[in-house]
Amino acid sequence: MFTPLTIGLGAAALALALWCGIAALRGEPTKDRHFVGMAVVTALAVIQLAIGLFRLGAGDRPSGDTTAVFVSYLVTVPACVPLVAIVSLGERSRWGSATVAAGALVTAALQLRLHEVWGGGGG
Amino acid sequence: MAESLIGTTGVPPAGDERRRLRSGPGMLLLTLYVIFTIGAGSRSIYQLATRFEEAPLAYLLSAAAALVYAFITATLVWGGETARRLGLAACVLELIGVLTVGTWTVVDPGAFPDATVWSGYGMGYLFLPLVVPVTGLLWLRRARPRG
């Protein structure tokens, strides 16, 4: 779809997962700086959604799999991190941090899938 | 010993019955179920609405998976002993579903012109559909009332 963004978003999500995973292991809840990280990942995800919808609107179709699967992944990506961010606001324990780490991991994994579904290469 | 074990799992004191299923690790599990409900739900609504006749079996199974995810999400949010038992039953159903459909897609791929959420034991979703119900069963068992 747009490979540099897919890689960038995947790397940012992995970094966020690692960061919050460490906080969870230390028994710490999420802090303001973690929310800055979540905001960055969310912003990238929204840009990706916009690009994806624009390319679908322009008539491009994923070649690796069906459009349904692609759209499903595309809308799940920007939903993941905001959702876990809200959860971690309510769950002020290490489990809030673990939840953000899990959501970020799902986001990163979805990048791999989006890339595969769109056609495997070339962007 | 029992006290300290419960302390480290994040289960709050028994007084707060309703919240217990979705506190600590339960909140992590609930989040995964919400993500899966969105993922499987958006996919199956799109497929059922646009091209149901192409692969009715696969799309209906995906929709069934989405409903099971939504139901377990609801039981975790609702809390309490009845919800916990319903959640346990739904997790068993989910596990049976992913094992049955997973095996079915491996043995007879011809029955599925298009993939389901549970195809190849949830391979398209990093095998999380296989991991999540097991985690759910462990958590719901651990969260049973004490005393």
Image (cartoon, rainbow, N blue to C red):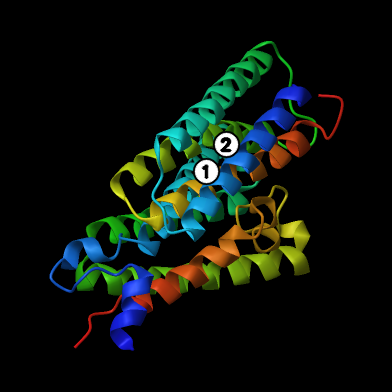
**Residue, disc 1:** B39
The spot of residue A113 in percent (x, y) is 71, 41
Q: Residues within 10 Å of mark 1 (few under 14, many from 20)?
A: many
Percent across and percent down for residue B21 are 29, 65
What is the quadrant of the C terminus of chain B in the image? bottom left
Q: Are marks 1 and 2 on the same chain?
A: no
Task: Write down the quadrant of residue B139 in the picture.
Answer: bottom left
Which quadrant does the N terminus of chain B fall into?
bottom left
Vertical position of residue B49 compared to residue B67: above or below: above
- Position of B6 with respect to B123 (left or right) is left
Q: Which residue is pictured at 66% across the width and 55% down the height?
A: B126
Name which residue lies at 22% across and 84% down: B146
- Identified by mark 1, the residue type is Gly
Q: Is residue B73 left or right of residue A67?
A: left
Task: Calculate the distance from the C-alpha at mark 1 to the C-alpha at mark 2.
Answer: 6 Å
Question: Which chain does the residue under circle 2 lie in?
Answer: A
Q: Chain letter of disc 1?
A: B
Disc 2 designates what residue? A72
> Mark 1 near mark 2, Cβ–Cβ under 8 Å?
yes
Closer to the camera in the image, B5 or B14: B5
Q: Residues within 10 Å of mark 2 (few under 14, many from 20)?
A: many
